[in-house]
Amino acid sequence: MKITVIGASAGIGLQATRIALQQMHEVTTLSRRIVPLPDHAKLRRVQGSATNANDVRSAMERADAILVTIGAKSPFATTMFSDSARVLLQTIREMGSSPTLIVLTGFGAGESWGYNSFSMRILFTLLLKAVYADKGEQERLIAGGYSRWEIVRPGRLTNEAMTGHYRVLDKLVEGMKVGAISRADVAHFMVAQAENPTYLGKHVALTC
């Protein structure tokens, strides 16, 4: 299948690109920096921005699934996540396509904010509130503007090796525990859902 990874130069996006290529999918990446992978017959790189309509259109041409894995390094207020969602949805409408969208946010975005532990809510309030507010808007736009989507909300991310064993929680429940999970396992889940989307229309939390 043809998979586009938006935000593929590092972290979960880079891991997802590796996994998708190992599964022999055709992969197109979109990122500001060149994706640091060897040349591959099934890899096409687009250097550009997730908020530039021309770049997004070039990257998602003929895509069966799109993995959105963009991230922000700064804790300051941003509109990057919501801006990219608007561009992506408009481009899909203009192209008349219907790819599956697998969109990475984080546990704490949207209504999941209130289900974090007390200590995590304090941390988010002090350091990440502005970023997660925009991730929440990204979620709202995707869920309200398209039909084939999944929102992926991992817990605290680590650089541990991929295990393929993790919990997928598709309901918000008082007292739920969403802890650490490796970036590699999140990437594994996202590629698996691109291949066989079993959580369409759902916000899923990922944790070990």
Image (tube, rainbow, N blue to C red):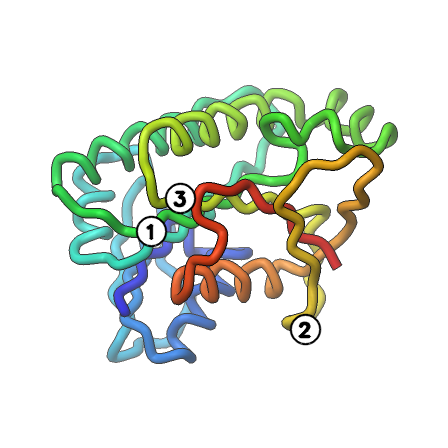
Q: As shown in the figure, which amino acid type bears the numbered disc 1?
A: Thr
Q: Which residue lies under the disc numbered 1? A: 100
Frontmost residue, 169 versus 19:
169
Q: As shown in the figure, which amino acid type bears the numbered disc 3?
A: Trp
Question: Which residue is at 84% across, 37% downward?
Answer: 175
Pointer 1 or 2: first along the chain: 1
Pointer 3 or 1: first along the chain: 1
Query: Of circles 3 and 2, which is in front?
Result: 3
Q: Is residue 58 left or right of residue 134?
A: left
Q: Which residue lies under the disc numbered 3? A: 149
Frontmost residue, 94 versus 171:
171
57 over 131 or under it: above or below? below
Give percent across and percent down for residue 208: 75, 59
User: Could you say whether the residue bearing mark 1 is in a helix, strand or loop?
Assistant: strand
Query: Of circles 1 and 2, which is in front?
Result: 1
> Distance of mark 3 from mark 1, alpha carbons?
6 Å
Specify the farthest residue to the left: 95
Question: Which residue is at 73% across, 25% downward?
Answer: 114
Frontmost residue, 79 versus 142:
142
Q: Which residue lies under the disc numbered 2? A: 163
User: Could you say whether the residue bearing mark 3 is in a helix, strand or loop?
Assistant: strand
Q: Is residue 147 left or right of residue 123?
A: left
- Mark 3–mark 1 CB contact (< 8 Å): yes
**Displayed quadrant of residue 56:** top left
